[in-house]
Amino acid sequence: MIQTLNVALGERSYPIHIGCGILSDAGLITPHLKQKKVVVVTNTTVAPLYLAALQGALEQAGVAALPVILPDGEQYKTWETLNQIFDALLGSHSERGTTLIALGGGVIGDMGGFAAACYQRGMPFIQMPTTLLSQVDSSVGGKTAINHPLGKNMIGAFYQPRLVVADLSTLDTLPDRELKAGMAEVIKYGLIRDPEFFSWLEANVDRLMGRDKTALAYAVARSCANKAEVVAADERESGERALLNLGHTFGHAIETGLGYGEWLHGEAVAAGTLIAAELSLRLGWLDDKALQRVEGIFARVGLPVTGPRLGVACYLELMSHDKKVVDGKLRLVLLQSIGRAVVSEAASDQLIGAAIEARCT
Ligand code: NAD
Ligand code: GLY
């Protein structure tokens, strides 16, 4: 069964298809192509697993599919790797009507999307996410980027895909550590705006970690529904969309501070969410019981509930590059309760430092 959701953005609206075995259903893709030619951007891990199935299905449908196989890892989300995509696009005489398909996790999706936004000032783009994290978050909403040594995802563009195809069967080959990391972004939706989903997650976390397909299908679809609603209301993050960054300001500091790829994005977001929850408690917004529920669900998944000890000054310096900084003032996503988040300037550096001290070991 295929579930289909819609990201409502006027003439740039697009469907998200979620189902098992749909990667090789070329009929989902061909109606969105302008030309019978696509470039498939993927990496050295995903290519041996899924490229042949996708390429074969497209070729059977009369579509030429040129692969671009990049090195795997967050540390390769750089200008140099991006240039490899441009080299392949130019080398293959790709045109403005050629579609770029990103086949892989969030790193491939973010880089493929940014390349598509830039090539000839914009070529059509399709997301085929193959990690839990990319199926529930990064493939939807049009944020694309590469990293800079001074800050994560600092160079990028808003550029929406034409289509998202999330094949749940690809999660069968995902390492456990990556499945856990994806759960950080799933839990996020419960925490920021969907308390019922948070309770469902508490009741079903073992099924999800056991890769029960029915539970995964529900969690992916509910996450995408939440994300699609937020993006439709605030595409370019002038308000509500910032809430999707719960835990990310601290998390990005952890990723940049330790060196990209040391901690997975979802692991850093999990620890960052606990620091944000600790700060919310210290502001008198979240009570002890709620903080324990937040810690409890991340611990049950097997995600970190404390951050690395980089030092408060180092965290604050790294966090000063956050995209939510306005006029030099850091704004953080904090929790008023489970299911209700706000963007706030209420916390002083001293209080932020105390929460970091308490939550980083
Ligand atoms: P990732 O892309 O690095 O993928 C994780 C690992 O799993 C990689 O080694 C990858 O090759 C491998 N892999 C992918 N699919 C597989 C499969 N089916 N079977 C086996 N291995 C597979 O990491 P991720 O967690 O998917 O994404 C993290 C990235 O997403 C970060 O760079 C983060 O900044 C970005 N992100 C972007 C947004 C957005 O809105 N654009 C949102 C959240 C995160
Ligand atoms: N992951 C944050 C966003 O898409 O806005």
Image (cartoon, helix red, strand yellow):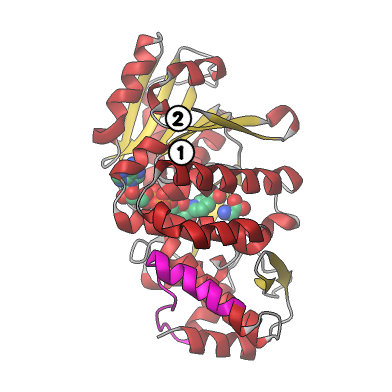
Q: Residue at x 50, y 16 (%)?
A: 30
Q: Residue at x 45, y 59 (%)?
A: 205
Cβ(mark 1) to ligand 1 < 8 Å?
Answer: no
Task: Indicate whether residue 11 is drawn in magenta.
Answer: no
State the image coordinates of residue 306 (x, y, percent, origin top left).
44, 79
Q: Amino acid at mark 2?
A: Ile
Q: CA distance from mark 2 to mark 1?
A: 7 Å
Q: Earlier in the sequence, mark 2 or mark 1?
A: 2
Residue 112's disc is 1
Left or right, 123 with respect to 208, comes to right
State the image coordinates of residue 148 (x, y, percent, origin top left).
46, 59
Q: Give the camera-side residue of 314 and 187.
A: 187
Q: Amino acid at mark 1?
A: Gly
Cβ(mark 2) to ligand 1 < 8 Å?
Answer: no
Question: Do the numbered discs 2 and 1 sit on residues whose CB atoms are within 8 Å?
Answer: yes
263 shown above or below 197: below
Task: Indicate whether residue 295 is drawn in magenta.
Answer: yes
**Tag in front: 2 or 1:** 2
Quarter of the figure with the C terminus: bottom left
Q: Residue at x 60, y 81 (%)?
A: 289
The magenta span reads 290-311
Q: Residue furthest left?
A: 48
* Quadrant in which residue 192 is drawn: bottom right
Q: Residues within 10 Å of mark 1 (few under 14, many from 20)?
A: many
Q: Residue at x 74, y 71 (%)?
A: 327
